[in-house]
């Protein structure tokens, strides 16, 4: 299990082993998902976008916004 300490600004450092394993690098957008008492941090990758496609019923607007964000990330 990896751990981190929360700063006074609410920031944490994701351990490098986990960043490398999950492809998280500078500019990678992440989302926080509440699951009961747990908080899950997920990198917003193309695979994750495919996984959640259609689940929030926005008629494609949310998907377009996520894809636009991913495009901006790749340009960094």
Image: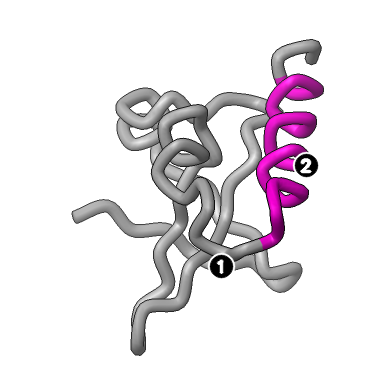
* Nearer the camera: disc 1 or disc 2: 2
Residue drawn at x 57%, y 55% as measured from the top left: 31
Locate residue 30, reporting x and y percent. 58, 47
Residue drawn at x 66%, y 26% as measured from the top left: 26
Kindly report the secondary structure that dominates the magenta region of the rendered protein.
helix
Tell me if residue 63 is in the magenta stretch.
yes
Locate residue 51, reporting x and y percent. 40, 44
In front of the other: 42 or 21: 42
Instruction: From this view, report whether residue 18 is shown above or below residue 13.
Output: above
Q: Is residue 60 left or right of residue 18?
A: right
Instruction: From this view, report whether residue 15 is shown above or below residue 16.
Output: below
Q: The C terminus is located in which quarter?
A: top right
- Of labels 1 and 2, earlier in sequence is 1
From this viewpoint, which residue is outermost toward the left? 1
Which residue in the structure is indicated by mark 2? 65
Q: Secondary structure at mark 1?
A: loop
Instruction: From this view, report whether residue 73 is shown above or below residue 55.
Output: above
Q: Is residue 19 left or right of residue 26?
A: left
Q: Which mark is residue 6?
A: 1
Instruction: From this view, report whether residue 35 is shown above or below residue 51.
Output: below
From this viewpoint, which residue is outermost toward the bottom? 37
Locate residue 57, reporting x and y percent. 61, 63
Locate residue 39, reporting x and y percent. 42, 72
How many numbered circles are shown?
A: 2
Residue at mark 1 to residue at mark 2: CA–CA distance: 29 Å
Tell me if residue 72 is in the magenta stretch.
yes
Q: Which mark is residue 41?
A: none
Image: magenta residue range: 58-73
Tell me the crowding category of disc 2: few under 14, some 14 to 19, or many 20 or more residues within 10 angstroms, Cα based.
few
Residue drawn at x 45%, y 77% as measured from the top left: 34
Colour convention: one colour
């Amino acid at each position: 299990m990896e751990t981190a300490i929360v700063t006074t600004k609410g920031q944490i450092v994701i351990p490098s082993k986990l960043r490398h394993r999950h492809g998280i690098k500078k500019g990678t957008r992440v989302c926080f998902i509440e699951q009961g008492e747990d908080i899950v941090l997920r990198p917003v990758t193309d695979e994750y976008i495919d996984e959640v496609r259609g689940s929030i019923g926005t008629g494609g607007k949310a998907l377009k916004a996520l894809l636009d964000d991913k495009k901006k990330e790749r340009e960094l």
